[in-house]
Image (cartoon, rainbow, N blue to C red):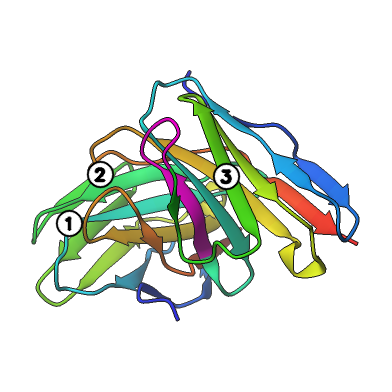
Amino acid sequence: ILNVEQSPQSLHVQEGDSTNFTCSFPSSNFYALHWYRWETAKSPEALFVMTLNGDEKKKGRISATLNTKEGYSYLYIKGSQPEDSATYLCAHTAAGNKLTFGGGTRVLVKP
Amino acid sequence: DVKVTQSSRYLVKRTGEKVFLECVQDMDHENMFWYRQDPGLGLRLIYFSYDVKMKEKGDIPEGYSVSREKKERFSLILESASTNQTSMYLCASSPGQVTRGYTFGSGTRLTVV
C-alpha cells in the first residue's frame, strides 16, 4: 500500500488548457516533498523539492504548492503543450535520504 | 553534464540465472538507490546505500542483494532470477542532503523468461 497517493492516475488535456493534479502524503514527521517528470524513454527529471509549509515553486509553465499540515501538494501546468506529456511523480521523505514515491499521474496533452 | 549510467537498457535472462545490474554515477554522491517500477505500483525501493560498503534494505528486498565496493558504483544482484522480477529497474543517486533531488539513470528493462 502506497502511503503517498497521487490522483488522478491519468488525465488527457487539450493543448492550451491548464490542469492540476494532487499528491497526498503523511503529514506527520514531514521533511521534504519532491516532484519529478518522467518522459517516455528518458530518466525521471527533478522538478521541485519543497520543504516548508506554504512553499510555492515555479519552473516555466509548471508550478507546485505545498501544504504540510494537511499533507498535500498540487502540481499545476499552465497552457499545456504536447511536450508536457509525461508521468509526474511525487515523493515524500520523513527522515534520512529515502524517498517514498507515489504511483504517478500520467498526463497526455492532445494537440 | 552529470550522469547516472546503467549498464544495459534491455536485458533478457532465464529463470534461475544470476543477474547483475550495474549503476555508475560521476557526481561523487554519497547516496545510491535501486528502485523497480511496475504498472500501478509506482517506484518501489529495493535497496539503498549511504556510503561505500554500506547497504540498507528498502521496501521489497526479497530476492535481491547489492554491492557497493566503490563510491561511484552500486550493483543490484538477482541471486536466482524469477519471472516475477520482470520489471523496469531504475538506479538513482543523491548528495547527502535530502533537499537535493535524485538523479536517475535511464533504466534497465529486465525480462525473465
Marked residue chain, label 3: B
The residue labelled by disc 3 is B66
Kindly tell me whether residue B40 is visible in this rendering: yes
Q: Identify the residue shown where x is 57% and y is 52%.
A: A82
Magenta-drawn segment: B43-54
Instruction: State the image quarter where residue A111 is shown.
Output: bottom right
**In the picture provided, is A58 more to the left or to the right than A87?**
left
Above/below status of A29 relative to B31: below
Q: Are marks 1 and 2 in contact (CB under 8 Å)?
A: yes
Same chain under badges 3 and 1? The reply is: no
Whole-percent x, y for residue A29 in the image: 14, 67
Instruction: State the image quarter where residue A78 is shown.
Output: bottom left
Q: Are marks 3 and 1 in contact (CB under 8 Å)?
A: no
Q: Secondary structure at mark 1?
A: loop
Depth check: B9 or A53 in front?
B9
**In the picture provided, is B5 more to the left or to the right than A26?**
right
- Badge 1 amino acid: Tyr
Kindly tell me whether residue A110 is visible in this rendering: no
The residue labelled by disc 2 is B98
Whole-percent x, y for residue A67 in the image: 14, 68
Q: Secondary structure at mark 3?
A: strand
- Badge 3 amino acid: Val
Q: CA distance from mark 3 to mark 1?
A: 27 Å
Q: Which mark is residue A31?
A: 1
Dot 1 crowding, Cα within 10 Å, few <14, some 14–19, many 20+: some
**In the picture provided, is A59 more to the left or to the right than B23?**
left
Query: Magenta includes B47?
Result: yes
Whole-percent x, y for residue A2 in the image: 42, 76
Q: Quadrant of the N terminus of chain A?
A: bottom left
- Badge 2 amino acid: Val
Marked residue chain, label 1: A
